[in-house]
Amino acid sequence: MDRLHLMTVFVAVGEEESFAGGARRLGMSPPAVTRAIAALEERLGVRLLERTTRHVRVTEAGQRYLDDARRIIAEADEADEAAAGSNAAPRGHLSVTAPVLFGRHYVTPGIVDYLRRYPGMEVNAMFVDRVTNMMEEGIDVGVRIGELPDSSMRAVPVGHVRRVICAAPSYLAAYGAPQTPEQLAQHTIVQSAGSSTPPDWRFASAGRVQSLRFQPRLVVNSNDAAIEAVRQGFGVTRLLSYQAAPLLASGELQLVLEDYATPGIPVNIVHRDSRQGSVRIRSFVDLMAGRLRAEPILRSKK
């Protein structure tokens, strides 16, 4: 069998963790998928998958091969696209990631626009409030909020967001609004414990940045839950400006301590760097960058 075909089958089974799921993705019969995996393992002389009655898991060797196979398939696709010409309409599959609320409100409309423009494309969107390893998880494009570490990824700046502190009008009417950061210690704190949320709250004043840590009465593992708690009048929380924007606009939340706001946090679209430049990735990044740069919520650094 063709080696690239065998790799494609293995990637589908490994990502789906199922022979049947891989077969459905590729439009193949389950027996054909089973034969392809057996042929690949025989050719390599190593077991790539561990099979049980309920699950399929990649082995340690299989995980290394899965990462390499994804890269090789992507480079082959890019070579085809480059040969077909930069004006060819994108076709195929694209994987995209972003934080949950940002993905829901700002990335999903862009994905819908993209799919309407390019009928030959399919998109898998994974919205999670954690930093994904795009190479290991086979993701083509991601939206990152925060400073970027050095990596092989290419970054396209699209704007800034900022951290804001807010509470419901009913809470502020009952307990008063804090006038200084230190006064937050006397208030009910609701804090999200997401992996991208630092525990220290930072404030800017007189040209310097001050970090404070408060004892929260409620800790939740999602920004949605923190927003809902304070919307109901239970305490003060810290959010990113885009997360709070709808409720600030409706008057359900109010900002506090605005004079102590820290500088904006960069927002970037990141994607794999490649020599050929994938038409699929390039067309999506161009569309999404244009949409995000036009969003008012991303324009201010202050």
Image (spheres, helix red, strand yellow):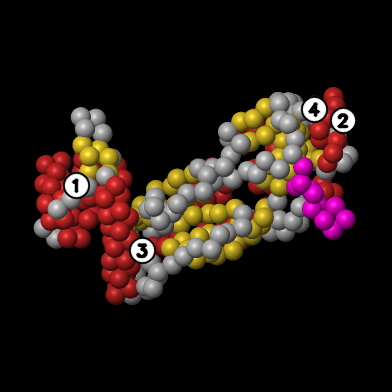
Q: Return the residue at label 1.
A: 47
Q: Return the residue at label 3.
A: 90
- Can you tell which quarter of the image residue 300 is in? bottom right
Q: Earlier in the sequence, mark 1 or mark 3?
A: 1
- Whether the residues at callouts 4 and 1 have beta carbons within 8 Å, the answer is no
- Give the number of the disc on residue 123: none
- Give the number of the disc on residue 171: 4
Q: Residue at x 27, y 54 (%)?
A: 65
Which sits in the foreground, 244 or 50? 50
The quarter of the image holding the C terminus is bottom right
Q: Return the residue at label 2.
A: 176
Q: Identify residue type, mark 1.
A: Arg
| Circle 2 SS class | loop
Q: Identify residue type, mark 3.
A: Pro
| Circle 3 SS class | loop
Q: Residue at x 56, y 59 (%)?
A: 149
Nearer to us: label 4 or label 1:
1
What distance separates the C-alpha of mark 4 from that of mark 1?
A: 60 Å
Q: Residue at x 61, y 36 (%)?
A: 193
Left or right of 168? Residue 154 is left
